[in-house]
């Protein structure tokens, strides 16, 4: 049974664990920190399927970084919208210097819901293979 229409999910990605937060539709609605999950594809898929059972439409986002675009491709393969954001394009408060996984995930979910994030171009697998073969950067 689906209770809500759509949700905005923010990931703070890392090599071993991802911090996850959700924001429901509406300016005054709740933003919840769901906790950390293992970064394995099986754990990510389990979490996405659990959220898909509760919401009709899911929007995901995470910061571009050393973890690559595997998460983006996995979310897209499961049929959901995903945005990869450049860290330099994320609006930050002037006094906010301490970075925590929880705060970053909640901030990403809130900003995605507000429509204040700018996505970056994600290379497809063909572009990646071409770059490997030619020795250029993708």
Image (cartoon, rainbow, N blue to C red):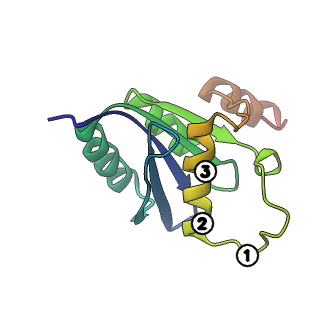
SS class, disc 1: loop
Q: Is residue 13 left or right of residue 30?
A: right
SS class, disc 3: helix
**First-in-chain label (2 vs 3):** 2
Q: Tell me where residue 39 appears, x and y as whole percent.
A: 45, 60
Mark 1 and mark 2 residues within 8 Å of each other at the beta carbon:
yes
CA neighbours of label 3 inside 10 A, class few (<14), some (14 to 19), many (20+) = many
Residue marked by disc 3: 108
Q: Is residue 52 left or right of residue 36?
A: left
- Vertical relation: 57 (above or below) 92: above
- What's the CA distance linking mark 1 and mark 2? 9 Å
Q: Tell me where residue 37 appears, x and y as whole percent.
A: 40, 63
- What's the CA distance linking mark 2 and mark 3? 9 Å
Residue marked by disc 2: 103
The residue that appears at 77% across and 34% down in the rendered structure is 138
SS class, disc 2: helix
Task: Report the label total.
Answer: 3
Residue marked by disc 1: 98
């Amino acid at each position: 049974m689906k209770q809500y229409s759509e949700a905005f999910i923010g990931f703070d990605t890392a090599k071993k664990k991802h911090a996850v937060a959700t924001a429901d539709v509406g300016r005054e609605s709740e933003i919840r920190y769901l906790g950390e999950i293992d970064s394995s594809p099986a754990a990510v898929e389990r979490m996405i399927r659990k959220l898909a059972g509760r919401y009709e439409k899911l929007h995901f986002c995470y910061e571009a970084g050393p973890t690559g675009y595997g998460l983006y491709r996995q979310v897209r393969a499961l049929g959901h919208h995903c945005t990869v954001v450049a860290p330099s394009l994320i609006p930050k408060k002037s006094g906010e210097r301490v970075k925590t996984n929880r705060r970053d995930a909640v901030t990403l979910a809130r900003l995605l819901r507000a429509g204040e994030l700018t996505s970056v171009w994600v290379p497809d697998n063909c572009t990646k293979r071409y770059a490997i073969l030619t020795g250029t950067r993708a």
